[in-house]
Image: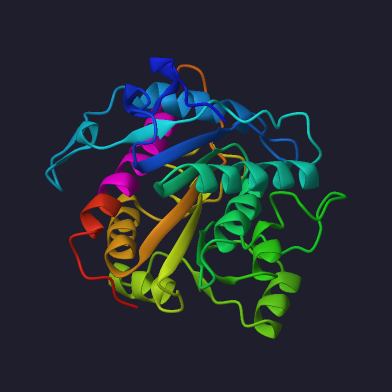
Amino acid sequence: MHFSTDKDSCFLGLRAPAKNEPLECLLVPVPYDSTMSFQTGSKDSPAAIMKASYQLEDYDWELEIDLSDYAIATTEALKVETLEPEDMIGGIESAVKHIMNTHDVKLLGLIGGEHSISTAGARALRSRFESLSVLYLDAHADLRDDYQGTRWGHASGARRISEFTNITIAGVRSISYEEVQFAKMHNVPIVFWNGKSAPETFIDQALEHLNTNVYLSLDLDVLEPHVIGNVGNPEPGGMDWITLMDLLKTLTTRHNLVGFDICELVPVPGNELGSYAAAKIIYKLISNNIKGDDSETVV
């Protein structure tokens, strides 16, 4: 797998660091949306997010970190758009394992695309970190055993992950009765979002069952649609921006974030708010993770 050398295809416009240099973060674009069931087009989001990221300042004034001082690289986009869902997941898993075996990467991020890619990312990182937990932020539980003829689509990501590692689902505000019953039977923690609990309480509940090493899977529909409305399956009444930022900061302070994915943006020409907000989330994940090294990790 090759690093991208095109400035417009690299996060923050940062070109690939020197060969064999340890990487603070490596981002992998995954332009895939073959199982989306409502609004399609998330396969275009990795390119849109990279383009929007070029407008961000390298300097994070809150954390006093200049990201251009760190080795942050972006690979060329994975060629998965023509694959069947299960083959796509296997292909991404193999690619991530290859990356982790050939590069010194502190934090690996998959940029979707649809949310079905989360199974691949979590499974690959689970092979390296035995005690891995997954924090799955989503407006939907994604605990269906199958949906629209496949067990490997965007509505089954959390279900598949629960079969091989510890998972907490947070931010949920839409769920089927069958999913509720599965979560109860298999002790899958679900932290619902109704906007009424204190943010600190919600964050503590979302993090309390996680082990030290964490993979974050973030569906952008977890946010209030006023923040990012152009997603695959928008759901009213979501998490506010400040609570998400506080959650990410707390996560990287208390735990060791080793990987993440960010999914379900559907770019809208002429309306760059969603792409910019998604790029900013990635930006804050990276800077918070760097700053988190200065704090004592607890569980």
State the image quarter where residue 180 is shown: bottom right
Q: How many marks?
A: 0
Q: Residue at x 51, y 73 (%)?
A: 131
Identify the residue at image location x=34%, y=42%: 22
Q: Is the magenta stretch mostly helix, strand or loop?
A: helix
Q: Is residue 133 something one can see in this rendering?
A: yes
Q: What residue appears at the point 43 percent right and 15 percent down from the top-left corner? A: 6
> Relative to 87, is 8 on the left or the right?
left
| Above/below status of 288 relative to 40 | below
> Where in the figure is residue 155, as x and y percent of width and height?
70, 54
* Quadrant hosting residue 30: top right
Quadrant location of the N terminus in the rendered image: top right
Q: In this view, does 226 lie above or below 142?
A: above
**Residue 286 drawn at (x, y percent):** 32, 45
The part of the chain drawn in magenta is 272-287
Image quadrant containing the C terminus = bottom left
Left or right: 183 in relation to 277: right
Residue at (39, 35) in percent of width and height: 20
Is 53 positioned to the left or the right of 288 in the image? Answer: right
In the rendering, at what x and y percent does residue 277 appear? 37, 36
Can residue 125 be found in the magenta stretch? no
**Quick check: is 280 in the magenta stretch?**
yes
